[in-house]
Image (tube, rainbow, N blue to C red):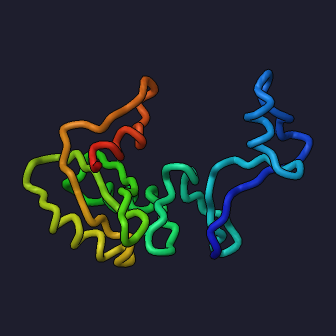
Amino acid sequence: GEIGQILLKGPQVFMGYQNLPEKTQASFKDGWFLTGDVAVMENGYYRLLGRDSIDIIKSGGYKISALEIEDVLLKHKKVKECAVVGKDDNKWGEIVVAAIIPKNKTISEEEVQNWCSKYLSDYKIPRMIKFLDGLPKNSMGKVTKKELKNIFS
């Protein structure tokens, strides 16, 4: 499994954005639509890792899926909600950081990191964790990860 961007081509794929020639040109290469989604092939199937722009954390030469880490965090019985982003780092490029809304206040950063170490490689474990009362969301209820990154700045 090498990580790569999903490209689409065929008669069912739209031909461009109406009245937006620059966006259309940036979104197509040699007739292929650049979706911005990143995946890895495992056992003959593609596993979606997230959006290249925000869900893929580039740390120490690795491309890390924020969605994979969020999935592990959400399986912890004390985690109600979470979001993972990359924080700029001079040494690694980015480091993995997590914002967590706990189900109760008795969860610690060490407990979360120990939990993650059971299911994730060391380089995927959040290096910094903030416990919040809520996550920044847009009008559709989706976490705004660009805004969340600012919390870790």
Q: Could you say where residue 82 lies in the image, as x and y percent from the top left?
A: 31, 49
Tell which residue pokes out farthest to the right in this image: 11
Tell which residue pokes out farthest to the front in this image: 90
Q: Quadrant of residue 49?
A: bottom right
Q: What residue appears at the point 39 percent right and 57 percent down from the top-left corner?
A: 86
Q: Could you say where residue 119 lies in the image, as x and y percent from the top left?
A: 35, 73
**Foreground pick, 119 / 26:** 26
**Foreground pick, 41 / 129:** 129
**Foreground pick, 32 / 94:** 94
Q: Is residue 41 left or right of residue 126?
A: right
Q: Is residue 137 left or right of residue 48?
A: left
Q: Could you say where residue 47 lies in the image, as x and y percent from the top left?
A: 60, 62
Residue 62 vs 54, above or below: the answer is below
Q: Is residue 146 left or right of residue 12?
A: left
State the count of labels. Answer: 0
Q: What residue appears at the point 83 percent right and 40 percent down from the top-left corner?
A: 13
Q: Quadrant of residue 59?
A: bottom left
Q: What residue appears at the point 29 percent right and 49 percent down from the top-left corner?
A: 153
Q: What residue appears at the point 39 percent right and 53 percent down from the top-left corner?
A: 85
